Image: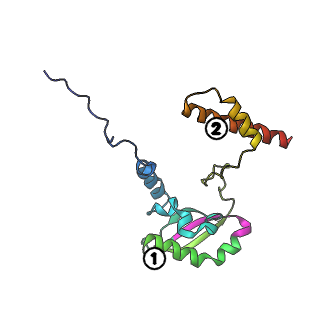
């Protein structure tokens, strides 16, 4: 009499850890397609497509297609003060976006002048985290003194990092007052 095994969770692979992009690709695709983005790479790699300088101030919002599906319009959000400069760069942006698609999918770019987050409540910006600032020697010494008695290497490293964050935050709040 053999024991029956419990069925595996559907869709679960037995390879261990997976990249976040592979787990979220279907959700990103459906969200992008709802706004007209047939190629989700345009959204997920916007700074690589148009360049870091332009991507810092311009965000793609939607792609609107004409009646026959040709000559789509890309709508982007631009801060009002930068709109004239981006207006002069429309041709460059158009060429780069069409290179992402692989053909002349977009024929026009429509600028909407607003904040980069749009008209909604302020949202989190998807930008890289700032680089860690070097910690002062006084904070490093204080943290090392506090964690001196901990013998486990991993626990000591975690406590030191926590201590540095707390003391750095306390120090910066003291300077602001």
Q: Quadrant of residue 53?
A: bottom right
The residue indicated by pointer 1 is 104
User: Which region is colored magenta?
Assistant: 73-82
Q: Is residue 44 left or right of residue 25?
A: right
* Label 2 secondary element: helix
Residue closer to the observer: 127 or 175 = 175
Q: Mark 2 = which residue?
A: 161
Measuring 51% from the left and 66% from the top, which residue is drawn there?
64
Q: Residue at x 47, y 70 (%)?
A: 100
Q: Quadrant of residue 83?
A: bottom right
Q: Position of residue 107 (x, y in %)?
A: 51, 76
Neighbour tally class for label 2: few under 14, some 14-19, many 20 plus, Cα within 10 Å: some
Where does residue 91 sit, x and y in percent of width and height?
58, 79
Magenta residue check for 80: yes
Q: Main secondary structure of the magenta part?
A: strand
Describe residue 79's horizontal placement relative to residue 150 as left or right. right
State whether residue 96 is above or below residue 77: below
Furthest residue toward right: 177
- Give the side of residue 4 with respect to residue 163, left or right: left
Of residue 102 and residue 172, the one placed in the foreground of this image is 172
């Amino acid at each position: 009499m053999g024991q029956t095994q419990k069925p595996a969770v559907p869709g679960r692979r037995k390879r261990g850890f997976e990249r976040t992009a592979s787990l979220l690709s279907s959700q990103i695709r459906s969200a992008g397609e709802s706004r007209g983005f047939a190629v989700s790479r345009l959204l997920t790699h916007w700074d690589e497509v148009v360049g870091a300088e332009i991507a810092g101030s311009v965000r793609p919002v939607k792609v609107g297609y004409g009646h026959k599906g040709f000559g789509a319009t890309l709508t982007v959000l631009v801060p009002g003060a930068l709109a004239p400069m981006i207006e002069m760069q429309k041709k460059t942006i158009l060429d780069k976006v069409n290179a992402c698609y692989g053909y002349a999918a977009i024929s026009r770019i429509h600028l909407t002048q607003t904040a980069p987050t749009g008209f909604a409540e302020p949202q989190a910006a998807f930008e890289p985290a700032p680089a860690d600032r070097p910690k002062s020697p006084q904070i490093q010494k204080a943290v090392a003194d506090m964690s001196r008695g901990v013998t486990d290497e991993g626990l000591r490293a975690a406590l030191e990092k926590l201590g540095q964050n707390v003391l750095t935050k306390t120090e910066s709040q003291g300077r602001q007052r």
